[in-house]
Image (cartoon, grey):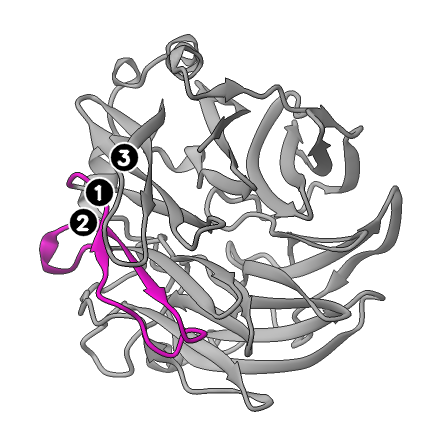
C-alpha cells in the first residue's frame, strides 16, 4: 500500500479556497518592488513547472517540464551574462509519471548534461522506471536509457545526481522489494550508481535497505567522495522517519547514520525530504521535521566530510511546511530556503546561517501556495548572486518564475 500522508498543516493550507491564495500579479509585484530582487525572464512557455537549477563554473543551468495536453516535454537551457541559450527539448512522452515532488533531476559535468524522466512501466499507479538522458552541446549522446535495471514493475524515482570524476553519481529510491505478497515485507530501498559520460551504468549498489517511500534524496561530493542524505524508516514498528546520511569511505558505502535523532514517529510518508550541499570537507544539511507535533526546519553543518554534525539550528518562524533547499556561500555560511504560512498566504523564506550557529534575519522571496502543484522551489548561488526559481500557480495553469539578488 502506498502512503502519501501529508502533515495536517500542509493539508489545511492546500485546501483553502482560491481567494486565500494571492493572484499572480500581486506576487510578481511583491517580488519586483523589493529593492534586493531582480526578476529574470526565463525561456519556459505554456504550462511550465518543475524547475531544477544547477550552478556550475559560473553558469546557471535549468531543466523544466512543459505540458501540452497529454504530452510532457523535458526542456533545458543555460544562463550566462544575463542571456539564456535557446531552449533544448531533451525528450517528450505521453507515458510519463509527472509528479510535483518526484521531478526530473539535473547534473552538469563539463559540457555534458545528465537529466532524467520517470516513465510508466506497468498499469500500477506507481509503476515507473528512471530513464536517463545525456546531452552535450546540442547533441543527445544517449536517450531514454534505464538507470534501474531490475526489470520489476515498481516505483523507481526521487533521483539526485552530482558530477563525479569521469561521469556522475546518481542515487534513487528503488521499489523492487515492494511487490511481495506479504505487505509486511514490502520496503523501499535506496540505491546508488555511477553513470559514465557514455551512458554506461556501473557500481550499482543498495546503500540502505529500508527508507521512507516518497521523500526526495540529495547527494553531494566531499573530499572523501559521495555522501547521500534521505529520510530513513526504522526497522521496528516505531516508524521513526528521521534524516540519515550514508557516506562513501575506503572504497565502499558505509553504514547509514542519523544526522540528528528527531525521533519523528509517522505511520506514512511526509513527502518532504532533506537538502544538501558540500564544499570541500564541509557539508550542510537542511531538513523538515514535525516530531513532538512541532513542524520546523533545521540546519546543521559538518566540517569532517559528514562524519559528525553540530547542533541543529532552527530557522523557521513556526508551523513550517518545509520543501527545503540549501546552498553554500564562499565564506562557508549557507543559504536555506523553505515554505511557511504567513497570515492567509504561504511564503518562500530564505535565511543565511553561519557555521557557528548564528543566522541573519530571514527574508521573504515571494508569496506562493502550499498546494502540491507549487512543487519545490529551487535555489543556486554563483559568487555573490543568488538565483531562485519556483512554480507559480494560476488556476489550472502554471508558469515558472525566477528572481536573482546579490548578497
Residue 331: x %, y % from top left: 44, 51
Task: Check if mark 3's residue and mark 2's residue have beta carbons within 8 Å.
Answer: no
Q: Residues within 10 Å of mark 1 (few under 14, many from 20)?
A: many
Secondary structure of residue under mark 1: loop
Q: Residues within 10 Å of mark 2 (few under 14, many from 20)?
A: some
Which sits earlier in the primary sequence, circle 2 or circle 1? Answer: 2
User: Magenta part of the protein: which range?
Assistant: 290-318
Q: Is residue 63 above or below residue 363?
A: below
In this picture, residue 95 sits left or right of residue 182: right
Q: Which mark is residue 109?
A: none
Secondary structure of residue under mark 2: loop
Q: Which residue matches tag 3? A: 362
Q: CA distance from mark 3 to mark 2?
A: 18 Å
Q: Which residue matches tag 1? A: 316
Q: Which residue matches tag 2? A: 295
Residue at position x 23%, y 72% from top? 239
Task: Check if mark 3's residue and mark 1's residue have beta carbons within 8 Å.
Answer: no
Amino acid at each position: 500500500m502506498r502512503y502519501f500522508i501529508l502533515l495536517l498543516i500542509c493539508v489545511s493550507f492546500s485546501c483553502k479556497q482560491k481567494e486565500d491564495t494571492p493572484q499572480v500579479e500581486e506576487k510578481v509585484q511583491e517580488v519586483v518592488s523589493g529593492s534586493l530582487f531582480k526578476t529574470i525572464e526565463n525561456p519556459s512557455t505554456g504550462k511550465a513547472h518543475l524547475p531544477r537549477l544547477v550552478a556550475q563554473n559560473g553558469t546557471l543551468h535549468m531543466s523544466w517540464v512543459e505540458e501540452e495536453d497529454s504530452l510532457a516535454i523535458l526542456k533545458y537551457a543555460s544562463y550566462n551574462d544575463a542571456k539564456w541559450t535557446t531552449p533544448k527539448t531533451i525528450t517528450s512522452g505521453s507515458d510519463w509519471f509527472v509528479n510535483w515532488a518526484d521531478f526530473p533531476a539535473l547534473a552538469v559535468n563539463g559540457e555534458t548534461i545528465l537529466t532524467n524522466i520517470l516513465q510508466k512501466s506497468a498499469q500500477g499507479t506507481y509503476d515507473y522506471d528512471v530513464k536517463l538522458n545525456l546531452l552535450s552541446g546540442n547533441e543527445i549522446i544517449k536517450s531514454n536509457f534505464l538507470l534501474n535495471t531490475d526489470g520489476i514493475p515498481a516505483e523507481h524515482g526521487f533521483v539526485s545526481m552530482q558530477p563525479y570524476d569521469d561521469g556522475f553519481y546518481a542515487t534513487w529510491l528503488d521499489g523492487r522489494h515492494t511487490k511481495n505478497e506479504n505487505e509486511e515485507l514490502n520496503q523501499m530501498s535506496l540505491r546508488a550508481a555511477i553513470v559514465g559520460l557514455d551512458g554506461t551504468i556501473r557500481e550499482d549498489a543498495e546503500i540502505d535497505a529500508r527508507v521512507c517511500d516518497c521523500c526526495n534524496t540529495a547527494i553531494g561530493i566531499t573530499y572523501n567522495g559521495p555522501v547521500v542524505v534521505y529520510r530513513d524508516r526504522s526497522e521496528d514498528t516505531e516508524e521513526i522517519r528521521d534524516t540519515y546520511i550514508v557516506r562513501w569511505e575506503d572504497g565502499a558505502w558505509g553504514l547509514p547514520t542519523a544526522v540528528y535523532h528527531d525521533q519523528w514517529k509517522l505511520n506514512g510518508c511526509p513527502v518532504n525530504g532533506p537538502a544538501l550541499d558540500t564544499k570541500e570537507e564541509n557539508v550542510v544539511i537542511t531538513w523538515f521535521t514535525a516530531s513532538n507535533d512541532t513542524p520546523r526546519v533545521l540546519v546543521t553543518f559538518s566540517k569532517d566530510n559528514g562524519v559528525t554534525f553540530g547542533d541543529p539550528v532552527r530557522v523557521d518562524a513556526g508551523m513550517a511546511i518545509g520543501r527545503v533547499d540549501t546552498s553554500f556561500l564562499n565564506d562557508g555560511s549557507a543559504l536555506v530556503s523553505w515554505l511557511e504560512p504567513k497570515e492567509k498566504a504561504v511564503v518562500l523564506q530564505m535565511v543565511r546561517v553561519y557555521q557557528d550557529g548564528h543566522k541573519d534575519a530571514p527574508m521573504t522571496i515571494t508569496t506562493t501556495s502550499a498546494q502540491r502543484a507549487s512543487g519545490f522551489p529551487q535555489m543556486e548561488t554563483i559568487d555573490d548572486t543568488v538565483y531562485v526559481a519556483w512554480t507559480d500557480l494560476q488556476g489550472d495553469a502554471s508558469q515558472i518564475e525566477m528572481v536573482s539578488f546579490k548578497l
